[in-house]
Image (cartoon, coloured by chain):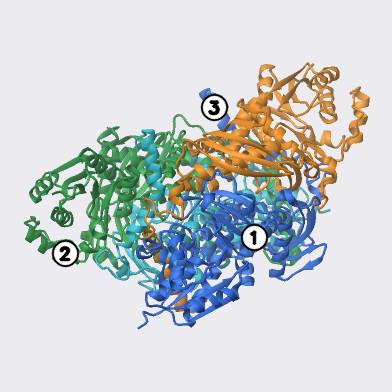
Chain colours: A green, B cyan, C orange, D blue
């Protein structure tokens, strides 16, 4: 008799195929779930394989548009970045995948969901916190945290043996000595030979982008248009793209050709370990940089300062830690929207051998920048003599400070 | 009879030469002051010119080492950046110049100091707030904010005429259609044709760095060593450099060859205007990026988070606004030092056609990164099963949130 | 011939009466404006006096409800407080007064507005920044910053003489040796004998509240109901009040009877001076404290933390500095609203001899607090053993820290 | 044969006495540890009882002075407060207790430490994170999180039976229907009948302070002197106290007599549950309020703002969550010290029927407050006309905002 139905996040790879077989062995019925978030994958082959192993069903969900619009775009709107470097590519995909999986779990009447995340990483946390928020009654089966499982399967060989025993088909390609996670926004590379933070990633690690040294000798230019901080049009030599998904893919294609968006970082995981990750985030790097640039032209200084210090930092931290489905994310997202009403305009961009440059920016609707007023050569509406009073008043407090230093004889 | 002695920040250019003549005309005695903060300048010629115009004396101060050690290095230690883009090159130089000028003013018995800053910019504020903190009794003469002066000299032609009238020598070179400010850390370009934020800076604007498209086709590698967050050694193909000033100049030379450090930004001035600036910050860009990278390896997550949100943001803002000589800068600098005790190690870097990349990093003394512990393939000291409890506890709050959403029928 | 029409913020007192006479003397036509923000004032008498002096007209605006709803209530929603102590009573009233005055100025075709604020205080800044945002073309006449005016009127005696000369009626009451500003939310006392920060305010300074030592020997209890963080009902022994203005006045009445809301502080003005202020904020103190208490029961921890660190601090600073009509206030107010969706419930309160106490709180709609779950005596849904994993994971980072300390021999 | 030596945090009460017996039953040798942090306790009787039950030894450590100086005083220096209300009394004591216990554990060669904290509270986290940082190899035995233990002892009756069985002496006094934790800084009351957040704590809950209604009808005055933000002298009618511990006890005595320091809050525990706590923090309330007041007089505005927003908030959060022995606490404590160099002076205080009031404050060394300069009646060194320029410059940005609103027809 079945111990109940489980919905497994399935990838078609060795790990989740073995987990599928193992769950069946434990007496569960299993429904497989695959999210298409833009990764390069043979979904049909995986589907066949899942059923062959014994899954009741295997669903493939195209979540690309919702991934771009609901996750990537707010990240652009608030210039999200983790620890000064990481653009959150993996973190951004997790909420939509978890939500898709939970919807299938519900539809199929599953009492539990399962995944193949390891027990030391961030993804287990991100998936499970999402699961619990989406349905507080859901059960989670995390084999890589279950001693019964992880003590039985201590390495790749144990899995290969088990696959052979269970008749699980295994692709002939030799595993790469690092692990990868791909979606529309990025591809990550970590573990294996990359665990030594002083080892430079070998050239063949990088999958999405051309090596900057092999990139074209001619730069490529394009223009991104924003409305309320959201990319709404991208114009390049081929023409204009306005559909959100197409626009994002177009930005990816341009940046990939020119080797833009490679990152190598030692970061702090939510559980407190440090880990080394190499990431490619081609299109998102360009769109985020263009957005930052436009804000210089059209966003009020104080709104920007508040947003930078609080919203950007915390939104990134929350996403990284898997707290997307949370009151604080809802709260911060309201603030993001409120900050972006004036972020309307366009940015002319250039990519070249790994670098992204802004060529110019303009806005038809926003007038915060006033060429004649900020000009050093024109007097305009504003009298320079008025600045004297501004400085005098700012100096009141500092004079007191200077006096005290003089009294105590401390050098400044 | 003299109206008293004034110490003028002198550059040898048309503006300050006319101001010098004008101050003399007003009945002041004038001592000129030139700070060598690493700008390309014929100091001797300027000195001769100042005396020829009528200055009592013209002092040239080599402040390069104190500029690097007291300003640039703390900025590296806290990864200072203004509005996500600007590395504060001009702001960093102002405090040392103001301090040098005030020391001369004091030695020479000047009752006032003067400068040639315009009345809409940041520099007037930076200089004067420094003057007032360094000596609360000092008087400031700011001709470009004095209607008597600025209504008389409405453009370059008025100055040229005045120079001719007063016998002020004028170099034959035609003025560039933008203004520049150079020091060891950077060169800035603004105003003139750059005032239109949609105009791409012409190729001949850039002075310090090679155009990335003209940079060598071969990358160049070097290694930076840090102790307590300070750069202490730079090793490249030519050998090792440990002297602070030499090290900084070496970083500059490498980055300049490869076109690293160009910035183009619309920023928010302290007085509330937006302005467009183009900047080259070659060496500082590399040293700052290397420092950020090393912190990933050796800095505690929570110290980093507090430092990022609190110290970095505010230190940059304070520097930008000219509040170096202030209680808050002293306070923040204590925090910077306190945050850097573990920032010891080395970073292998690469520059190539405008981009900077980290190749690897290591530390002999710091052990926060533990290859085997963070490895996905090893169990080590840490039991993956323990993460279950971590997630369960993190989920307590989120389950409540999910329940409420279920009750109210709101979709997540 | 008239130099144009000016709208003067008029109070009926000696200062603004003399300013009115002086503006007329300068050749302006003057329309007077009085805002009723709840201060005790004989508006009719003042109106008569204004016209008698020569005002074209004198308008009295009842802004009490808009003051309570648009300013006091958002301040309660975000627990606004300046420098840990001051509840912003004066700052809260300025925006509505400035808006009212500008509306009259517009209707009457005035080219300028005028006020009687002194040149060292916060109020001049608050009023004028509001004026300029409300109409960037408006002119401001600030006599107390005009040397022509302030050098002529160096003290109260000069004003009294001028009043006599101009036939301005002066009330017989002797001026108090401190200045006051009253509205619905508070009354302030500063200057004069209160300038010495070590002088305890004499008993007769306080106007709104009973001295705690003279307050009733029996406490008084009442209940405040909140919806989305806004006070919507107050129930006391006399019954229930739901109208916003009535509710606020009721809270005032209760708190005044029991001496609640007295404050004495040395604060930092926007212009950089420190000043000493004594304030009475009876009702607002109670409503704010009740609101803080309710948030404990119904607000998510992380939303609260973000709101406390980011919104509360900055909203108070912005209000204090007179930046109500600004992009940053709009931005923060959106965040306030977003933070308060769950702040629904009721708080039972007690006042007694100067102190405010919460007796209990409850919510019919919010379930974040779960008596059985947080109970130490019940196991419930949550297994205590799970906390072990939580602690283990939290300790990963700290163990590294401890190991380093052991290695370096530093005591913890 | 012994399973090894364990050091148990012992209180002499029913819980830890049963845990002691149970640990012995499990085959451990047990050394008991009692920290005297100022709680009212018969340490000698507890010592006798521990040995009678079977402890190898029972140590009593007087940690009161180190508790006051190392924990309470830094908390005063940074005005620490959690969620606007709670003064962290329990959290402050945990680090010194954990450190004392670990020192004994080391001296006695214990492989593990144990405690009687429940599995849903904060204290287990605070103790264990401290243990792990102090010795990363230590083992922790937490019976109330061990199902073997907590399923055997489901309530007080099970413990009483076990005590009878094991011959553990039980005091005759009936347990109170709430739990308490006392130390020099405060006493806490929670659980039991207090779990309903709408139940007003009965009068007999409060132990340390007199009911405000029963407090003397005459206020009591005293003066606190600070150096670098630390209380160094307290003067009252009986004379002056300068010893840190004596001073703290004196502040307690005064505040207790007058019913000052009662708090009732629903707070957010680290593990994500909300819980209701009632606290009495008499002396600390007074010293913290006096410190806040003095900062108004002597602390620079910007240092205060940075400290309030970052240090105060985060220091409190870190302490509350048990992260005292952490890099971030070290970092923040350096910032606290750096912020307090000017906090020198004295505050005259009054307590009366539950309330604390400041009567006045002064400083002999600090001059930031300047009576004549802030005076509205004197012109002094500062020209009011200069403020015009200050306002004009502040308005530049706001005028742009106003223009945009006019253009779009949005009302302000």
Residue C45 lies, with reference to residue C266, above or below; the image says above
Same chain, labels 1 and 2: no
**Nearer to the camera, C337 or B324:** C337
Q: Position of residue B155 (x, y in %)?
A: 61, 39
Q: Characterize the local packing of mark 2: few (<14), some (14-19) or many (20 or more) Cα atoms within 10 angstroms.
A: few
Q: Characterize the local packing of mark 3: few (<14), some (14-19) or many (20 or more) Cα atoms within 10 angstroms.
A: some
**Nearer to the camera, A176 or B229:** A176
Quarter where residue C313 is shown: top right
How far apart are the alpha carbons under marks 2 and 3? 64 Å
Q: Characterize the local packing of mark 1: few (<14), some (14-19) or many (20 or more) Cα atoms within 10 angstroms.
A: many
Residue D84 can be seen in this image: no
Q: Label 3, on which residue?
A: D405
**Nearer to the camera, D406 or C296:** C296
Residue A188 lies, with reference to residue A329, above or below; the image says below
How far apart are the alpha carbons under marks 3 and 1? 46 Å
Q: Nearer the viewer, mark 2 or mark 3?
A: 2
Looking at the rendering, in which quadrant would you find the C terminus of chain D?
top right
Q: Going by the image, does D336 lie left or right of C19?
A: left
- Chain-order first, disc 3 or disc 1: 1
Q: Label 1, on which residue?
A: D76
């Amino acid at each position: 008799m079945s111990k109940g139905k489980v919905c497994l996040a399935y990838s078609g790879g060795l790990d989740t195929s073995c987990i599928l077989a193992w769950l069946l062995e434990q007496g569960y019925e299993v429904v497989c779930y695959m999210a298409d978030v833009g990764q390069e994958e043979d979904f049909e082959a995986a589907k066949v394989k899942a059923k062959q192993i014994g899954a009741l069903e295997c669903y493939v969900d195209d979540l690309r548009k919702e991934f771009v619009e609901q996750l990537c775009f707010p990240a652009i709107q608030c210039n999200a970045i983790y620890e000064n470097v990481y653009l959150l590519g993996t973190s951004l995909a997790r909420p939509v995948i978890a939500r898709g999986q939970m919807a299938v779990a519900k539809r199929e009447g599953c009492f539990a969901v399962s995944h193949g995340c390891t027990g030391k990483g961030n993804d287990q946390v991100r998936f499970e916190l999402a699961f619990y928020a989406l349905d507080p009654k859901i059960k989670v089966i995390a084999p890589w945290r279950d001693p019964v499982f992880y003590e039985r399967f201590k390495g790749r060989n144990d899995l290969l043996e088990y696959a052979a025993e269970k008749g699980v088909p295994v692709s002939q390609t030799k595993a790469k000595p690092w692990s990868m996670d791909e979606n529309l926004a990025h591809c990550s590379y970590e573990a294996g030979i990359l665990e030594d933070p002083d080892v430079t990633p070998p050239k063949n690690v990088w999958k999405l982008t051309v090596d900057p040294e092999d990139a074209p000798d001619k730069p490529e230019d394009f223009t991104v248009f924003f409305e309320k901080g959201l990319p709404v049009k991208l114009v390049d030599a081929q023409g204009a793209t306005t559909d959100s998904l197409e626009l994002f893919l177009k930005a990816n294609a341009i940046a990939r050709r020119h080797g833009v968006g490679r990152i190598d970082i030692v970061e702090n995981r939510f559980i407190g370990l440090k880990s080394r990750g190499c990431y490619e985030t081609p299109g998102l790097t360009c769109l985020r940089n263009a957005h930052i640039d436009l804000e210089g032209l059209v966003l009020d200084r104080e709104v920007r300062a508040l947003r930078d210090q609080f919203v950007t930092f915390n939104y990134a931290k929350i996403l990284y830690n898997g707290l997307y489905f949370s009151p604080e994310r809802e709260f911060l997202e309201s603030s993001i929207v409120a900050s972006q009403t004036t972020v309307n305009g366009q940015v002319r961009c250039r990519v070249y051998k790994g670098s992204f440059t802004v060529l110019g920016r303009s806005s038809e609707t926003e007038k915060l920048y006033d060429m004649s007023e900020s000009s050093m050569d024109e007097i305009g509406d504003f009298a320079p003599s008025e600045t004297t009073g501004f400085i005098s008043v700012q100096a009141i407090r500092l004079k007191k400070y200077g006096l005290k230093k003089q009294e105590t004889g401390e050098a400044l």
